[in-house]
Image (cartoon, rainbow, N blue to C red):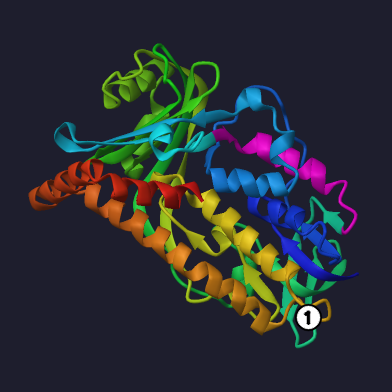
Amino acid sequence: MTFDVLIIGGGLVGASLAAALKSSGLNMALVETQPTAFSNEGWDNRMYAISPGGAAFLTQCDAWQQLDMNRVQPVETMRVFGDEDMELDFSAYQLGVPELAFILENRLLQQVLWQGLQEQDNLTLFHPAHCASLVWHDDAAYLQLKDGRTLKAKLVIGADGGNSWVRQQAGIVAPPTLYNQHGVVANFTVEKSHRATAFQWFQPDGILALLPLPQHMVSMVWSVSPEKSEVLLQLSHEELCAQVAAASHHTLGALQLVTPPAAFPLRFLNLPQIIKPRLALVGDAAHNIHPLAGQGVNLGFRDARQLAQVLLQRDAQQDCGNIHLLRRYERARKEDVLSMLLTTDVLKKLFNNSNPLLRAVRNVGLAATNRIAPLKKMLARHALN
């Protein structure tokens, strides 16, 4: 079976890229290992903060307008707390935008994207399907599935996550830097209204974020040591609610657990290259960042948007796997990715540190940033993309 483009990985970034190429005229295939049956019961504890730029891209993919907006929460204000009551706040009103971000479930967005993919004329879906081998030749790449089928493509796109199998097969190797932290996630109902505000507390032993959800709920992301993560997962529901309420200074009153906690390791990954002849990497397959800025998936959407633009704007006769074409994508993404990688890495190291000198520096920096309106706007505008 022969295709122009083969996308391996049907998560949010891979699925959105396929949708963005609907009008490209390219014959495409998408391989996903997981079944695509989505349950609508309860709430997903995996939430994302989608930037306005990400929402605009998903609208172009005909996905955003299909969402049940009763399960989507706009963020109008963000409050970031440091030591000694130092605070940095962002307001959509002050920035002249309707909202700073949207909080929604991974499952909800995944479902609407896949509904569109199943009706896409230029796309063949292989799911669930498992990859056995992947080799590149001058004229094409060849993927063999475990069921014996072989797919040939001019361009392979690796969208298969942080532990990317495609990246390994291509020999693009860079050891990730482990943060010695886990992200603990859970959803809660709250006693006091969150007023469409996202809260974040930088603490010496971790970073706690409470993101607003519909129906008087919040989503928690608490970046803590593996040892504290294990303790949090073992707590009773009542004890966990009490600890989160205390760590958030009871800002939202009493909490009630809605979805049980889960945890995942955090790491930093900056690759020396994200392309090779007939290969491009996107999303977590191309980079891993700390979740403290909530920008991981948005960075992936910007990858998908840029790669789609490069492929859509190519000459109709140009080989879509040509290395010179793919370099346009790599060059266009380099500054944005490196900027976000370094920013999140520096913030994590600056705030998760008990050094008195660093403590003084971060407090001065937080207070100064909050007072300098142009600097605040510059930081916020970057996150809105």
Q: Is residue 115 magenta?
A: yes
- Looking at the rendered structure, the secondary structure element under dot 1 is loop
Residue at 73% of width from left, 49% of height from top? 61
Magenta-span inclusion, residue 200: no
The total of numbered circles placed on residues is: 1
Quadrant hosting residue 114? top right
Residue farthest bottom in this picture: 138
Name the residue at the left extreme: 356
User: Could you tell me if residue 144 is visible in this image?
Assistant: yes
Viewer-nearest residue: 348 or 317: 317
Q: Main secondary structure of the magenta part?
A: helix
Image coordinates for residue 310, horizontal then vertical, percent: 68, 70
- Magenta span covers which residues? 103-122
In the rendering, at what x and y percent does residue 325 appear?
67, 79
Q: Nearer the viewer, residue 197 or 267?
A: 197
**Residue 197's spot in the image, x, y percent?**
41, 27
Query: Looking at the rendering, in which quadrant would you find the N terminus?
Result: bottom right
Q: Which residue is mark 1?
A: 319
Q: Is residue 57 above or below residue 175?
A: above
Residue at image x 75%, y 85%?
137
**Within-10-Å neighbours for mark 1: few <14, some 14–19, many 20+:** some
